[in-house]
Amino acid sequence: MTTKKKRSVHTDKDSWVVIAPDSALDTGKSEEEGDPSFIKLKNPATGSSSLYLFGRGDVTVYEVKAFSEDFRSWFIGQTVQRDGRLLYVTPIDPLFLLLPYISSTTSEGKFQPVEQMVVDEDYTGCTRLLLCKHGLDSLHHVADEKVVGGLKFHRYNQEKTLEWLKKKVQRTVRTLKKSNISVGGGVKSSTFVRVKQEDATEEDYLRYAHGLISEYISEDLSKDLLKHLQYVYLH
């Protein structure tokens, strides 16, 4: 597990206190790699604006979540920062961020270059996702691919997407069991409780893991995934 350190991240307008892996804030060794930067993108679950951190050279993308309490501030250097939020930075699979753009072309039913799919006037920073090799290399999990003249073209595939998400759920279930996370009735997916849960059923784990994964996909896709999981495990 990567050691996390508390440090401040400065921009021209503001400062924050961030808990993040060291790798998230490593600066580039060359101008081509670039430094880490915060960018607002479309949240894949809600469609609203969310903050993400692109690591050095856009190799890794991190989601930024804020924990806040009333009447909190920070001493940063010789100044007092009134924004008392504590930001948590954790890696996110960039394919989750690409998926809304890829799936939005499903009605067209044709193969397209990914550069033509990932376009957003409201969040122009989405083009940074095209520099994330891991995300581009994973497109085959959610789309059909074909190569013409050395160029790749893609078309959204719902069945592939559900299978990819199912595997995400399965890996999450294994992690929950290994970590002894309570998944019984009344426990919300957004709240982790490290306690032995001997009475939890396989369905409890699946539903809990489904809830976690649903925080990164649309409501409609979440419903389709639940149906897919029920079909796979109840038949």
Image (cartoon, grey):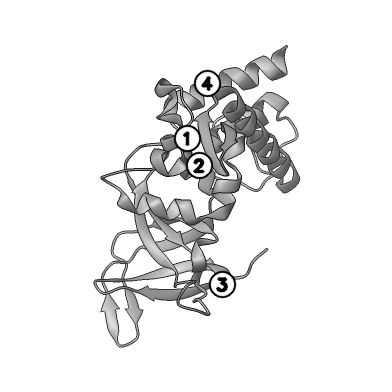
Q: Are circles 3 and 1 on residues that touch, CB within 8 Å?
A: no
Q: How many residues crowd around disc 4 within 10 Å: few (fewer than 14), some, or many (20 or more)? A: some
- Compare marks 3 and 1 and give the one earlier in the sequence: 3
Identity of the amino acid at label 1? Ile
Q: Which mark is residue 224?
A: 4
Indicate whether 114 appears above or below 130: above
Q: Residue furthest bottom?
A: 78
- Compare marks 3 and 2 and give the one earlier in the sequence: 3
- Compare marks 4 and 3 and give the one earlier in the sequence: 3
Q: Quadrant of residue 76 in the image?
A: bottom left
For mark 3, what is the residue? 22
Q: Are circles 2 and 1 on residues that touch, CB within 8 Å?
A: yes
Q: Which mark is residue 96?
A: 2
Q: How many residues crowd around disc 1 within 10 Å: few (fewer than 14), some, or many (20 or more)? A: many
The answer for how far apart the CA atoms under marks 3 and 2 are is 23 Å
Q: Position of residue 2 (x, y in %)?
A: 64, 66
Give the number of marks. 4
For mark 1, what is the residue? 217
The answer for how far apart the CA atoms under marks 4 and 2 are is 16 Å
The answer for how far apart the CA atoms under marks 3 and 1 are is 28 Å
- Is any atom of residue 188 visible in this view? no
- Compare marks 1 and 4 and give the one earlier in the sequence: 1
Q: Are circles 4 and 3 on residues that touch, CB within 8 Å?
A: no
Quarter occupied by the N terminus:
bottom right
User: Residue at image x 75%, y 34%?
Assistant: 198
Q: Position of residue 100 (x, y in %)?
A: 43, 35
